[in-house]
Amino acid sequence: MRVRALFIDLDGVLRRWPDSDEALEQAHGLPAGALRRTAFAPELLLSAITGQISDEAWRANIAARLGEAHRGLDAQEVVRQWSEPAGEIDLDVQSLLQARAPGVQLILLSNATSRLDADLRHLGIATLFDQVINSSALGVVKPDPAIFQRALTIAKVEAGEAIFIDDSIRNTDAASRLGIRSHCFKDPRQLKAFLQSVHALQPDEAPAT
């Protein structure tokens, strides 16, 4: 069945995060990994990526928890500095997406906070996508089957007409169970081979090497 929609994850696929946490933690006397352990604790993160609270509220909660755990820390300043970067785009992945076959919708499908649109503008890729599906706007996150069903409805395609790219095997497995051909991202070369295998790249795109 012809591919009519390409759903793609952001973090770990199209966007990379250079590891700058260690320097920031050392500068403020925090244990290694304290920032990520706090920020991505499920009880803090889930409320933000399901839209129960805003991105700003999530970051305020991170600062509050860090401040409670590390007395004397200027937690608000730490979180402010941690929040400044927006990551960087993998240009090889971006090039592949831009070389997709005619008629293939490109749709971002991301577990993200309310900051997503601002990040896309900052990264210069706000116009790359035909549509953006943000979990915090829908109130449901990957790998819940409901978010994939909503994505298919938004794209107006059947499962067999869609492909999905993500760096989480849990997410790609969930999509596959619905009949969406899926690829767990490792590197651009493997992604290119997958896109070629499902005829989602322009015919004149060179073979994977």
Image (spheres, grey):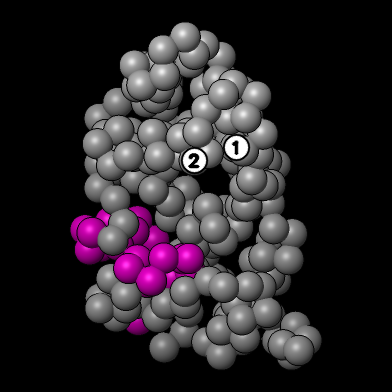
The answer to which quarter of the image holds residue 120 is top right
- For label 1, the SS is helix
* Residue shown at the point (35%, 81%) measured from the top left: 160
Vertical placement of residue 165 versus 85, above or below: below
**Viewed as shown, does residue 150 lie left or right of 74?**
left
The secondary structure making up most of the magenta span is helix
Give how far across and how far down residue 165 sits, in percent. Answer: 48, 69
Q: 10 Å neighbourhood of mark 2: few (<14), some, or many (≥20)?
A: few
On the image, numbered disc 1 is attached to which residue? Answer: 21
* Residue shown at the point (41%, 12%) measured from the top left: 71
**Viewed as shown, does residue 150 lie left or right of 164?**
left
Q: Measure the alpha-carbon separation of dots 1 and 2.
A: 8 Å
On the image, numbered disc 2 is attached to which residue? Answer: 33
Does residue 180 appear in this view? yes
- For label 2, the SS is loop
Residue 32 tag number? none
Q: Which residues are magenta?
A: 144-172
